[in-house]
Image (cartoon, rainbow, N blue to C red):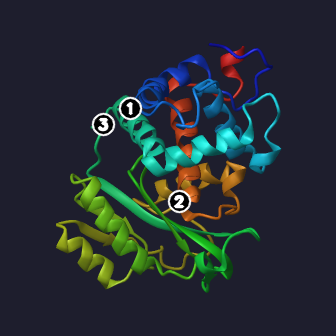
Amino acid sequence: MTTPRRPYRTDLSDARWALIEPTLTAWRVAQGGLGIRKPVHELREIVNAILYVNRTGIAWEYLPHDFPPYKTVHAYFTRWAADGTTETIHDLLRGKVRQAAGRDPEPTAAIVDSQSVKTSSNVPETSQGTDPGKKIKGRKRHLATDVLGLLLVVIVTAANISDTAAGRDIIDHLADTHRQVSTVWVDAGYQKSAVARGAAHGIDVQVVSKIPGQKGFQPLPKRWAIERTNGWIMLHRRLVRDYETSPEHSRAHIHWAMIDNMSRRLTHEATPSWRD
């Protein structure tokens, strides 16, 4: 059903909505909505509102009035993050993007890296720290992607957690959820214990070092795709800084950013094209 309001640039087209509608409709049938009263808002409008917040970076309470009430939208956002619905939609789209690229739905190789970002004033002191290398106080996003740059695993920690320590957890998650992965590429910030953790799971963890004499940023073989993923994520202003009280909500916003990216890729849409 189309909305009576004027569309926003972040709204789902019919084709993009068709990609995720079956999952959310099944969820509503099983859950009955939020369980407070009979649902009165369209799921498509709830998703449009989440994508609007994710892309524009506004606070929930500043959501435009022609969307459903912000407390309702936020309640759906938190419920879907907690029960795995957001990640289910994300993983479904990732498999479709891989198949559209002529690949198997499940990858056999992965790339691991991290990204430190500053936090806002509402983030608890206990869930943030200082990355001494980047000189950033905040949180760190530890990512694993496939060779297309599609997200496989994301863990959000305080920024003082080392790449090696979180890298061991990333490899554990990869081994548990993506069992076909046999090779992982990392940078020189990941030490021997991460390599050993990979070996324990039958995964070959290979360190890709900088080019001798390299100054500044240069894309490196095998690892360049995850740098592009970091760029995709940072196009969504809610993720330029970490505003979330809960690290799990930060993680959910990363999934929504990639849902936005992959749904556009599958439908071959730039932002305004579906309205032409």
Q: Identify which residue is drawn at 43% across, 24% down.
A: 22
Extreme-front residue of the structure = 37
Side (left or right) of 67 relative to 128: right
Reading the image, the residue beneath label 1 is 96
Q: Which mark is residue 51?
A: none
Label 2 vs 1, first from the N-terminus: 1
Query: Is residue 30 depicted above or below 145 in this figure?
Result: above
Q: Amino acid at mark 1?
A: Lys
> Quadrant location of residue 136?
bottom right
Percent coordinates x, y for residue 258 in the rendering: 53, 44
Tag 3's secondary structure? loop
User: Which callout, 3 or 2, points at the residue further toward the start of the chain?
Assistant: 3
Q: Is 249 displayed left or right of 28 in the figure?
A: right
Residue 27 location (% of width, % of height):
43, 32
- Write down the residue under mark 3: 103
Q: Relative to the observer, which residue lies in front, 27 or 32? A: 32
The numbered mark at residue 248 is 2
Q: Can you say which quadrant of the picture contains the C terminus?
A: top right
Mark before the other along the chain sequence, 3 or 1: 1
